[in-house]
Structures are given as C-alpha cells and as structure tokens.
Image (tube, coloured by chain):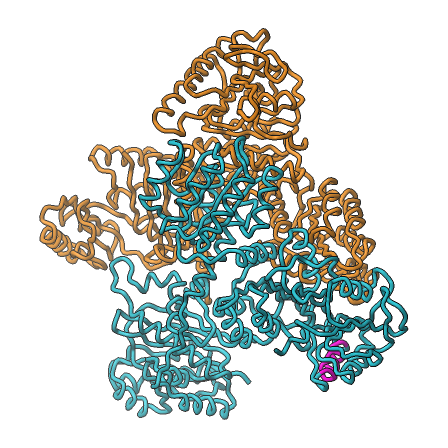
Chain colours: A cyan, B orange
Amino acid sequence: MKLDSIFRPKSVAVIGASNTPGKVGYVLSNNLLKSGFEGDTYLVNIRGGEILGQQSHKSILEVPGDVELAVISIPSRFVIETVEQCGEKGVKALIVISAGFKEIGPEGAELEKKLVETAKKYDMIIQGPNCLGAINTHVPYDLSFASTLPKKGSIGFITQSGALGTAVLDWIIAEEIGFGSIISLGNKADLDEVDFIEAMAESPEIKIILLYLESIERGRKFLEVTERVVKEKPIIVVKGGTSSAGAKAAGSHTGALVGSFLAYQKAFDKAGVILTDSIEDLFNYAVAFTEQSLPKDEGIAIVTNAGGPGILSTDLIESLGLKMAQLTDKTKKTLIESLPTAAATGNPIDILGDALPDRYHIAIEAALQDPNVNSVVVLLTPQAMTDSLTTAKHLRELSLFYPEKPIIAIFMGGGWVSGATKYLKDHGVPCYNFPEKGIKTLNALYKYSRQLKLANQDPPVYPDIERDKVRKIYDDVKKDGRKVLFPHEAAAVVKAYGITAPGSMLATNAEDAVTFAEEIGFPVVMKVVSPDIMHKTDIGGVELNLANSQMVRIAFEEIMLKSRKAQPLAKIYGITVDKMVPRGHEMIIGMSRDSQFGPMVMFGLGGIYVNFLKDVAFRLAPLNERDAQHMMEETKSYTLLQGVRGQAPADIDSVREAIIRIGHLVWDFPELEDLDINPILVYDKGKGCIALDVKMTLRD
Amino acid sequence: MKLDSIFRPKSVAVIGASNTPGKVGYVLSNNLLKSGFEGDTYLVNIRGGEILGQQSHKSILEVPGDVELAVISIPSRFVIETVEQCGEKGVKALIVISAGFKEIGPEGAELEKKLVETAKKYDMIIQGPNCLGAINTHVPYDLSFASTLPKKGSIGFITQSGALGTAVLDWIIAEEIGFGSIISLGNKADLDEVDFIEAMAESPEIKIILLYLESIERGRKFLEVTERVVKEKPIIVVKGGTSSAGAKAAGSHTGALVGSFLAYQKAFDKAGVILTDSIEDLFNYAVAFTEQSLPKDEGIAIVTNAGGPGILSTDLIESLGLKMAQLTDKTKKTLIESLPTAAATGNPIDILGDALPDRYHIAIEAALQDPNVNSVVVLLTPQAMTDSLTTAKHLRELSLFYPEKPIIAIFMGGGWVSGATKYLKDHGVPCYNFPEKGIKTLNALYKYSRQLKLANQDPPVYPDIERDKVRKIYDDVKKDGRKVLFPHEAAAVVKAYGITAPGSMLATNAEDAVTFAEEIGFPVVMKVVSPDIMHKTDIGGVELNLANSQMVRIAFEEIMLKSRKAQPLAKIYGITVDKMVPRGHEMIIGMSRDSQFGPMVMFGLGGIYVNFLKDVAFRLAPLNERDAQHMMEETKSYTLLQGVRGQAPADIDSVREAIIRIGHLVWDFPELEDLDINPILVYDKGKGCIALDVKMTLRD
C-alpha cells in the first residue's frame, strides 16, 4: 500500500538527531528508541558522535543499511539537500518535522515547492513539512514529541494542528484511552488527509478515524474516499475555522484556502462523516464507537437511581431528536413485580435512591430484553446505599451478555464513583460523569447507525436532458463577450434540462412579437432585454397581461420608447414575449459553487421572502431522489407544499425532480458560476411547476 | 431573617439518629458531629442510648436545652406526631428528610398537607419533606449525606433533586470547588426555591446562586425576587423537564406541575437569570463568577501557543455572538517588537509552539493593556519547550495586576498540564482543559455583565386606555353565556386599549348595515357573525369591496340567505360592517397564558405563514419599550419591516406600541385566555397599523 513506508516501516532514520535534552532532535530520537520499534534505527547528526548511547552518522548516505523512512528535523534551509541525499539513499518516505515552509510566507512556499519536486524525483512520499510526526502503537513506534506512548487501541487520529495533537495525546494518556495511530498533517505539501484516511481504512488495527481539519483541498476526492470508508469505519471530524474570524485565523495559520463552512457541513453529511464541534466529544464518541455495537433501531431506555438526572437525560434525548422507548407490557410487568412499589416503571425506570446492584441488574436486564429497547442508558448517583463498583461489574456482565444493544453508563459524582468509572472504562463500557456527554455520544452512535442503513442511491438519469443545446447557448454567450445570460437564454437552458419555463422568445421587432405571442397563446407578458437596464419595471420596461395582437404591438413600441428614454445609451437586445402564468407557491432553486466541494444546490421559500426568512436548504450536487426529498423536508415551507389550512397539496414530485435536474445541470457545467430560479412557481399536485424567472452567470 | 433557623441555627436536633453505620440516621448524626458545628447538638432516638459516643434522647421533648432546628429522618407515619412535639418544644425550623409524602401519591399528599398544617400551628418553617438536607461550610454544619464537607467557598446551590445534589457534592469535593451552602428542596411543602434564593441573597458569604429546578410554582414571585437578586448576585439555573418526555418524568418525580419550557425561558430572560442545559456548565460558570470580575465591554483577545486551539476558540467566540477584539496599533507594535517574526500578531495572538513563560507574559500583558480588550483567553498546549507551571504563575500574577479584566485559562492536555491547572484553580484563575468549556464560561460572564448594564425600565403608561369599557364587554360576553368574543367585540376591546381596528359594527338588518357603511365610509366589507359558522368565506358569509349603499343592502340579504341555507340551525347574531383597509405587512400579535408565569405576548410574521414558518418571538407581560423592541428584532420579519429591496420602512413605532398595549391588556385581564390579532396590518412609517382580525377567548 502507498503509505506502508510510513505506517509500517522496516527501518527509520532520524535526521537531525541530538544529544541535548529538550531539543526536538533529542526528543524524537529518545522517543523512537524507547518506543519498542523493532526495525533498524539510525540516528543522523551532522557532527556525528554518540547519541543516546547509539553511534550516529554524519549523513544519511553514510548509514550502512537500507532506510525506508526518514524523519527530518533540521533547519529548513538544509532540508532540500538532505532530501536529495535521502533520494539517493533510496528512502521511500519522509516525515518532515522542520518548520519554515509555506506557513511563513512566499519564500517558504517556494522552498516547499522545491521540497516536493525533489522528493517526487525519487518517488518519495512526504508527511508534513511543519508537522509533529507520527505515532503507531501497533508497530510500535513513536516519531513524535509525546512523553510516552498511549495505550494500544484502535482509534486513528489525523490532525492538521500538531499542537492539538500533542495536547490530545497528553490528555488521552491521562485518560487511558487506547490509540492505534496518530498523524500530524502539517502543511500537507504532498500527503493529505485523504491519503491518510485511505491508509487507515486499510489498516486492520484501526476501527475508527478521527480528524481535526482546518481545510480540505481535494474536496471531491475527500467525498469519494470518505463515502466509501464510512461504510466500514466511522469517521468523526472537528472542523476549525467555521466562523469568519476563525477561518481568517486558520488562513494565517497554515496558509490553506478555507472554503465555506456550509459546504463542509454538506460534504460531511453527504459522505456520512460525523461532524462535532468539540475535541472532547471527538474522543468521547470514539471510545463508545470502538467498544459498543451500534443500536439496531430507535428506542432508548434509561435506568436510574435518581429522578433529576433521569429527567435531564430524557430532555437531552428528546432535544437531539432521539426516541425514548415505549416499554412493552411484559417489561412493565417484570419491573412492577421485581421493583419496590415506589419505583417508577415507565421510562426512565427510576429504581430509587436505595437501589443495590441486584436491583440495577434486574431493571437493566428487563430493559435489554425488551424488543422496543435498542440501547440503554444507566444512570447512577452516589447515595447512602449505593455500591457503584459492584453495579459497574453487573453492568459489564450484562453488556457482554447482550452485546447487540449498546449501553452507556453515566456515573455522576467524584470520589465515590471513581473506582466504578475506571472499572467500566477498563472493561469496554463507556462511562461519563455527566448526562450531556453520555447522551451526545449515544446520539453519535445513532447517527452513524442510521447512516449505515441508507441504501446506495445514484442520481437518476434523465434521457431527455439536452446537454449539447446548453453547451451551444453557453458558447454563444461567451462569444458575445457576456457572462450574464439573458432571461430567454437562461430559460432555454433550464428547458433543455427538462424543467418547464415560460415560452420566452426574443423579439427584435413588433411583428415578431405578435407572431411569437400568437404562437405561445394569450395573455402574454413582455420584458425589455438589456444588460444595462437593471430595474426594468421601474422604467416601464415590462408590460403584463397583454390579451391580443394589437396590445402586443403597442406594448412593443411603448417598451422600446420608454427604455430608450430612460437609458438612451443602453444596449437593447430586444423584448422577450412570455406566456402569463397563473400564481402558485413561490419557491426558489439556486446554486452556489464552493471552491473545494463544487456546486451546491439550494431550495426553499422564494419570492421576496427568501432574503430575510432564509428558509432554505442546501445539498452538494449531483443529487439523488433522497437528497432532493430531504432537502425539501428540511425547509419549513415543505409544510406549505404539503397543503396547509385545507389547501390542496402542491406538486411535490415535480419540485423534487426539478431540484435533481438542476443538480445535473450545475454538475455538468463547471463554468456555471451562479444560478437562481426565483420564483419557481409550484402548482397543485399533478400540475407541475414553472421556472418563472431564471438568472444565470458564467465564470471567466 | 425568615430562614435564619436553617441558615445559622444555634442548636440542632437529629430526630431518628442511629448507631447503625449505613443507616440514614447514622450518616446524618455522624456528619453533623464531625462537621465542626459549634452550637448545641442533640440526637433523638426512640430507644435512647448512646449514639456515636453521645447520649441520645427518646424524644425531642426530653432534650434539656432549646432546639432551634430539628432534622427529621423517621418513617413518614411517625412524622406528624414528631412535628407536633417539635412545636411544643419551641423548635423554629424543620428539615424533613423522610420520604413518603406527595411523591408517593394522594395518600402521601394528604400526609404532607397535615405536616404543613401542624408546623404552621407552631409557626415552624419546613425544608422538604423528601429532601437530602442542607450543608453550610461557613457555620459550619453538615446536615446531609455528604461523605465530607466541601471546601469553604461562596457558591450557593439549591437543588430540587436530592440525588443530583449528592452527585454534585461528590464531584465538587473531587474537583476542590469551594461551596458556601447547599440546599435540597425536596417536595417544597413549605419553603421553596424563592425562599432560599432570598435567604442566600441576604447571606454575605454567598456570592452566586446556582439552581437545579424541575418546577416553579410561584412563577411571578420567582420573577420578582430574582429580578432584584441578580442585580447583586448572579443566578444560574439548570431546568429539568424541558422536553415533553422529560416533563412527564419530572411530573412523576415530585408531583409538581411543570409549566411550558418556553415560559420558563422567557421568565429567566426577563429576570436576568442565566439558563444553561448542563450541570457541568453550572459549576464551570460558578467558578469563574466567584473568582473573576465581569468584562466591562466587548472585545476578547486570545493568546495561544498553538494555531488549532486558537482557531477553535475563535469559532466558538463568534458562534456565541461574542466579539474578538480589534487590537490597537500600539498593541500590535508592542507585539511585533517583542515576539519572534513568525508569531501572529493579529487576534488570536499566536506566540508559537516554543513560547516560554516570558513570551506568554509579554503577550498577555500587551492584550490586557489594550483598551479594546476587555477579557483575555490564554490557551496553552504542552509542547517540547512549554513550561506550563511557570506560565500559570505569570498568569496569576497578571490576573492580580489587572483585576478588572477577566482571564480564562485553557490549558489543554493531561499529565503535562495538571500541575499548572491545579495551581491556577487554587489561585483563583478559572482553568479548563478544552476550549468549549472556557469560551462558554466567558459567554456566561458577558451575558451577566450585559444584564447588569440594562437600566430599569417600567412598562409605559397609556392614559388613553379604557379599562372599564373592556370590563363591560367581557361582563356582557359572560352574561351571554359565551367565552368566545365576536369580532366586533374583540375589535372594540383592542380599540379600548388604543389600537386601531376597523370600525366593526354589528348590523341586525339591512338598513342598519347601510347606515353603518355610510358612517364608516365606502368601500366596506361585511361578515356574518355566528358562533356556529366556522368557515364564513366558504359558505358565502363574507362580501368584500362593497362600494355603495345599494351593494350593502343586497349583500346583507345575500349573506343572510346563504348562511341560513348552509347552516339552517346556526345562531346568527347579525352581520359586521367594516371599512375595507389597504394591504400592509401581515404581522401577528397574540397571547398565551402560562400556568406559572401568566400571560406571554407573541409577535411575528402573520397571515398564513405564521403556522409553518413560526417566525415569532415571545415575552412575558407586562412589557416595556425594550422588551417590545427586542421581541421585534428577534424575528426575521423585522428585516421586512425595516424595508427590504428598496421598499419603504414600515411603521415600527406603532407596532412596538401595539405590542406593549396588548401586554397591558393581557396583564390587566387574567380572565383573557387566548388572544390572536392575525393579521395586524402594518403600513409605511408614520401610517400606523390596523388590527384587522381579532380573536379572543375568555376562561371560565
């Protein structure tokens, strides 16, 4: 595999090794030597001599054996020369710790370019530069600054912030969370998150992939890879730079172009990547994912020895859109028979403050056996009679006995519950000290579980789409030196993609206008076409409800007259003639293009409301039926389309199809910069929809 | 003060004291004896004998000295008799630990009633029953199940869930958070949160009041008291039972009536009480509140040794609506001169991974001296060169030197930063291990600071309000055996409160209709008035745009005819005649009444959109100018009123006044159950608004 030389190298050289404690080159050498790495290890220092009891070499070229992976930690000005030597030596992969590249400005960027060129000349792959290295507990090796190796585990962590990686490492070591592999991306001059995700996907010892990212440059590739990987291994991400100020800070940080957060959100959704905004959540989730199975279905039961935390947990469950289980009569009967009369046998199951471990056991087992229950939250508060450690042992036993239903323990308190908490963590039952953390984690399990159940669905194919026609329109517009399409051109484009639009024909004289109107059928509406006239209605450039040929003829002359009068220098292309269409629900379909992830389709309430009510939903193109349907359902206006206050339901099918067709259009033509159909008028069920006003802009 | 006997009793008796370890009566006695309580302590046990080395008494009546406070922990069936004895003995206050009251059902509720009656006979106050006691570290005393007294501090905590109190206690002891007083409310048979808030407000050793509440029975009193208290001491609350399932669980839990969460939210907002949904946040906030000053103004600076966490913190700051400071040129100059060239001297100030304590000192001090900076977030990740403990010491020093600007430390990591974290916590600088916690805490400080700055503002007085007129209309409606007002009555009510409404007059014959129409001015609209006809338009019961007397006459007969035909048995009161009004922005003003907090006014986008777009805001009545203004600004539709896409701005002043006037109406008439003005048509600035369609229902 492509990244084998980083993930499981047979030999490693540290270039810039040092004998001075505190120096990076010392820490790196020391960590590697004591990490238990079983391959050949070489230390390279320009002055040679003994380092940490091992003879160092003055240059990588002097190393006697083969070197598969070189870790470079020397001043940046010496890096290129060293990389050249690595190439000559036959090194396969480089981890460049050294800073002083793209992150310091144009000069550094130039150096970084040279670094990549040099490495590519010898077919070497690069992690970094400006990174904090890598850790693998399975090989094992420690090519980082970590004070000690974390516990062996199955979590993979890829971070664009090295310091965050160090902090997390320090934290997980204190929390005794097991890790498999940690990668600091640095400037991503060569290898990026996509490469490492792919490598971790192929590593059998990694079961879940965590990411801290500030930018994604290969947006579509990221989507393609993650969409595939999440079917096997969950991917959870924290995205830095979600706010404008944060993005600015991220920009100055690694010099990466930061796209819009909305596009990132939609990309993660599309791929099935779980997004969270908290580093702590990232690891809370990871622990549950690696140690518990996924819930098969909705239905959460809570077993608690205290009312308050049970209520708080129930509130959280509901607020996250999860469902409390409706216990079966059989379960209730079991509970009523086995629990004290004062116990609450609904859900939450309140087994009272004096509950001993056996009462917990009975209630939890009853819940686990209930077919309506697919996950269980066990709450414990330390009260006079509480035996938290024994309860924890019962819990673990039950968790082994009913492995198909995930259990989340929330043992609240400090000293009284610390032993039990440690026991649970050591034995694979995720345990939290506050309800929020536990319920949010359960929510992540549910989210991923739902994701896995979604069947693959390709965007539908519409054979009636006339791509060539659109190609020609765009080419003509470009030839004309324009970027903005005229209404009749834009209408023709959406028509070519199978969306109904008024007949829009461009008349350059009154007779043509009459002919077109007779062809289309009365009444018609006429509008002046000019790139220079913005507010057509205001200057008298629009005439509505023209009922016969005579009116059309007069309107043509009037519009021309008024337009000329208002803007004598305006270039006028003619006047469009359109059929007057009946009123319908005014919706909008639009598109904006993200620099990383490409075109994003928008749907929502149109008309003048779109700008301030912002009742709109977005999805990355292309769209399948489910995408388009969910998009509609995400808007509040969907209720309107379903028919409110006794109104007939609207033609939702035709809207869904229009959304998908626009998804195809924006996907097929990367030159399309902006698209707005506002309004698209939606009629009653069976009566379709009409793209009344279409605006399009091409890019240079 | 009323609660002195609980907050600082001179003598305490534990009734139900026990010599058997593990028993509640044992734990209580033991905790009290070893808590350092300096007053007289008596143990009462029905069998007498020596308990924990102290001679017990068989009854409270046998206790030799005075007893100010009695803590009762005996089976509920013996409680009344014991309370009677306490009364005879001259006890002033009772803490009833015993369960078996309202929470177990009607029988227990009866017993609880008797408990209160008995205590009141002797002028005794009661905490509980079914509570976990009280702790005060200043007296000191421990009348609870806590394993050990928490550190002395200035946080007061009142909890409606005893178990939550125990868990929190255990947690704060482990976290070494200082506490002043902890109160478990239990069933609130006598004393409730309002009483304890008042008592803590009067206790000089308490600086901040934390609450866990599931219900508030005296809603308006709670508002009145907290509104006053928060001016001196912040109040932070977690509310259990915010979801319907959670409320159901809360209901079964203490038998308390749970009001709507929306009303709670609005009540907390109105009073300036800070609401959070997480117990952990509650204490994170509390620590910062007691140890740091409040920010004087916006403007947060971040000093960090790592990009990633700086970015995440910036994102959080922006997402919470807080503002990053714009550093002055002077500060930037200082930073540029003192920091390495690669450092980022914007905000976040990134002092690079190799930052030693002195570099932190320079950057933090520069930030603190900047007039645009009013609070500082210091981020630290453990990197090779990092000296976290010395950095912590500098931080503390700076915090003492610049006490007016709060500092939040976020030291990420585990073992590497644990010493520094402990040092900061011990020395009054709040320190968190993840950005989320720190930034959320800072947000709470800002929220409270803004709250304190709000000047008192009373609801405006409108002398033109004709209360008696409304009184008469309501009385007449009741006399008529109705609860629903007719449109012309409802219109008359809002008119009496100074809101313009169409002339609405009720005609019972065609001639009257014509007279009214001529009086009002044409064109008019006519509508049938009948409690039995729901869909007036559908049956032909409405005629619009009637331009002259003849049309009015015909319309009257037609409407009567059609109404009779459609619903022959309907009771018809007549036909209203109204002036046709021009179109305007369709907004809604409404009211719903909360069982705990009274009437809540609603404002937002009206027409058919109200039901699915739900662009509405709520406030508890009565309203002042600021309330009404904020309410409008909370809706997205406010943009519409301000004038979008070149439209003229609407008459916002008149809408604000109408909202306030409706606030008066619903406050003045508690019998008003429901009110809906939909639409209230809003015209251009200076042209007012008209309550077009007014619906009102009275309660029984």
For the question of whether residue B149 can be seen, the reply is yes
| Residue A670, percent from left and from top | 50, 83
Where does the magenta region start and end?
Answer: A108-119
In what quadrant of the picture does the N terminus of chain B appear? top right
Pick the front one: B589 or B61? B61
From the viewer's perspective, is residue B388 above or below residue B131?
below
User: Which image quadrant is residue B397 in?
Assistant: top right
User: Which image quadrant is residue A131 in?
Assistant: bottom right
Pick the front one: B272 or B548? B272
| Residue B518, percent from left and from top | 22, 51
Q: How many marks?
A: 0
Helix, strand or loop for the magenta stretch, by majority: helix
Left or right, residue A324 beside residue B155: left
Left or right, residue A315 beside residue B691: right
| Residue B135, percent from left and from top | 60, 27
Asked whether residue B60 is drawn in magenta, I would say no
Q: Which residue is rendered at x = 86% and y = 67% of the image?
A: A51
From the viewer's perspective, is residue B582 above or below residue B199?
below
User: Which image quadrant is residue B492 in?
Assistant: top left
| Residue B637, percent from left and from top | 43, 57
Pick the front one: A458 or B503? A458
For the question of whether residue B374 can be seen, the reply is no
Asked whether residue A116 is drawn in magenta, I would say yes
